[in-house]
Amino acid sequence: MRPEILFPLFKPLTALDGVGPRIAKLIEGLAGPHLADLLWHLPSGLVDRRFSPKVAEAPPGAIATLTVTVDHHIPPPRPKLPYKVFCSDDTGTLTLVFFHAHGDYLKRQLPEGTTRLVSGKVEVFGNDIQMPHPDHMVPPEDAHKVRIVEPVYPLTAGLTLKRLRHGIEGAIAMAPDLPEWQDAAFRTREGWPDWRTALGQAHAPEEAQDLEPLTPVRRRLAYDELLANQLALALVRLNMRRLSGRSINGDGSLRNKLIDALPFDLTGAQQRSGQEIAADMASDSRMLRLLQGDVGSGKTVVALAAMLNAVECGSQAALMAPTEILARQHIKTITPLAEALGLPVVLLTGREKGKKRQAILDSLADGSIPLAIGTHALFQDDVAFKDLGMAIIDEQHRFGVHQRLTLAAKGRAVDVLVMTATPIPRTLMLTAYGDMDVSRLDEKPPGRKAVSTRVLPNSRLEEVVAGIRRAMDSGARIYWVCPLVEESETTDAAAAEARHEHLKEVLGDRVGLVHGRMKGTEKDRVMAAFASGELSVLVATTVIEVGVDVPEATVMVIEHAERFGLAQLHQLRGRIGRGERESSCLLLYAPPLSETARKRLEVMRETEDGFRIAEEDLKLRGAGELLGTRQSGLPEFKLADLSVHGDLLAAARDDAQLIIDRDPDLKNERGQNLRTLLYLFERDAAVRFLRSG
Ligand code: ADP
Ligand code: MG
């Protein structure tokens, strides 16, 4: 249970003064649903209002706080013209300019003949010194409220800085003093303030350098977050080790049949990974292994073989995918193979409902079905297996540690294999998986043709469309990927819909559309039509990013490629070049390109090597690329930035290990405080593994 001291921080945003449901929604999209999330929303800039020149000396463009006498008001002579208030000091006249003004309000704020402090941006028009819409207008006795430095925060459409700042101030005011979880000696050596102080200072920058990630204040907060991450992973590992495993060591009968049934030979890498997995399963400690292989490297067969190993021993196996499309894809590949072996498979997603779902649950509970494939639906509370021995989690980075564990908890000593197509650099690997064992599929199945990649400005779109028409005529199948507009699926979908309309006009009816806002059945129908060739062009949002397999597709167009991260571009492009035919990828961009965007596209043109791309990605993100982590699917840190806080990650990992060695159940005083840390960063699942609450 979450400690009481943290209750105030986990209140909803509406608990704040002046925050109603509408504003709460905006803030939630920006930061998160709880007050704690507001604490992590650190300033990205500041406004310094301490500069107080005379009117005549106020430089245009500067933020300044001026002390002036209000001379007279001039309401707009015609609608649409601004309301003006003329003010002055002994050096000159300052005109305050207001559009859409309420005269009554301004008369009350700025009575003629009074002295006022006005703060805002100074502008000069001809000989006129102006301040449009001052941020502050107060009587002299309130000067202390204005001549200050104010933090500036990243915003979202519809949310004003003032409101957000007010919310954050409210959240900080509610933040309790928390007991220190850092090692005392370490904290002294680093010169870090306590948590509450660090938080306050992080939100009250005085100078530009206070915003740098390497200040003691920011480093402390980053370390807290990294320590929570590393400690949670260490606890998960510890828990895995504590739970006794069991040996799963089938006689190979089903696997041999599988190999006979496959229309191809396994690659060397597939064989090697298969052996590593089998050895882990055979041992009586629990398996926690990562199968890492670039898109198209053939992970599915390796996964199926591991599942069959469990079935050979009379137990069940489950494969969980992050999206419904993917789960269906897996079932499509696996069902014919399983049928050849005489094994029934079920699919369980959010869409199986009522009687049908109940029948599936029954068959899993009584063990009559050995193989289950599904989405999150697989770890709902009412899903039970007779004897789950093997759990595979595909494209793991989309799931949290918590979900991974919930599935594993559905059986006795379940062996867990996690599959990912993201070639993850070592440092990031640590944050996502801790010290997991890894098998790598570093060899592609034979016969794959290279994908030729071209980068074009979107002014050549119509040319590209003409090329698509020719490709269609020769029977090609084409993905057309629409840009990520915002984090919202709704806007992405709108962009895709518009493009779909346009392409249908030019290319005819063989153009389909799939996006995340569509109903599941509708998505399936479109995907099936594309897979069968009934549709030639599939306009899509990034729902096709992971795993979708239509080997006949040979062309991919990505619009606004500059908006995608490298990892995501690589994933997307992996959808083509799967068959025997030459494939090409067209990356369309909207100029002008930022330096990092240009480099990303260049890397894409130069190489198809996932590991090289991952490394470049990290380097470019180090240069301040914000899109990176979210799109590569790795855990996102709110306070830590691995491109600058790498040393802290290593320290946090050692610290976590030491903590676990000395006080594995977090019982002593520091241990108790560390529990609070875990809850603060919502690593609740990890706390549940401790032997005593
Ligand atoms: P991944 O999940 O790693 O992206 P898949 O398992 O979906 O890759 O495999 C991609 C494609 O390659 C599938 O069509 C699969 O049947 C095929 N494939 C897998 N292994 C081999 C192999 N050894 N030789 C030839 N084709 C293979
Ligand atoms: Mg796959």
Image: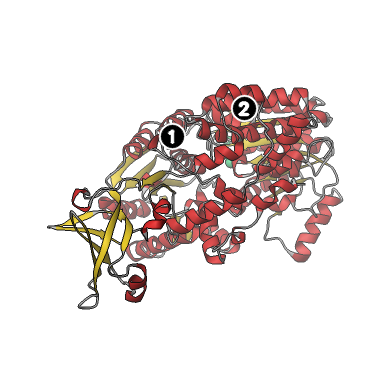
> Residue 345 location, x and y as percent?
74, 49
Asked whether the viewer can see residue 672, the reply is: yes
Secondary structure category for the residue under label 1:
loop
Residue 641 appears left or right of 224: left
Q: Position of residue 71 (x, y in %)?
A: 23, 67
Would you call the spot at circle 1 few (<14 residues within 10 Å), some (14-19), or many (20 or more)? some
**Is 302 situated above or below 471?**
above
Label 2, label 1: how far apart the Cα atoms are: 21 Å
Q: Badge 2, how many Cα within 10 Å: few under 14, some, many 20+?
A: many
| Numbered mark located on residue 174 in the image | none
Amino acid type at image mark 2 = Ala
Q: Secondary structure at mark 2?
A: helix
Q: Quadrant of ligand 2?
A: top right
User: Which color scheme is applied?
Assistant: secondary structure
- At label 1, which amino acid type do we have? Glu
Q: Is residue 178 left or right of residue 627?
A: right
If you read the primary sequence from the N terminus, does the residue marked by circle 2 or circle 1 appear first?
1
- As drawn, which residue projects farthest toward the bottom? 78
Residue where numbered disc 2 is placed: 652
Which residue lies under the disc numbered 1? 212
Q: In the picture, which quadrant includes the C terminus? A: top right
Position of residue 153 measured from the top left corner of the image (x, y, whole percent): 44, 49
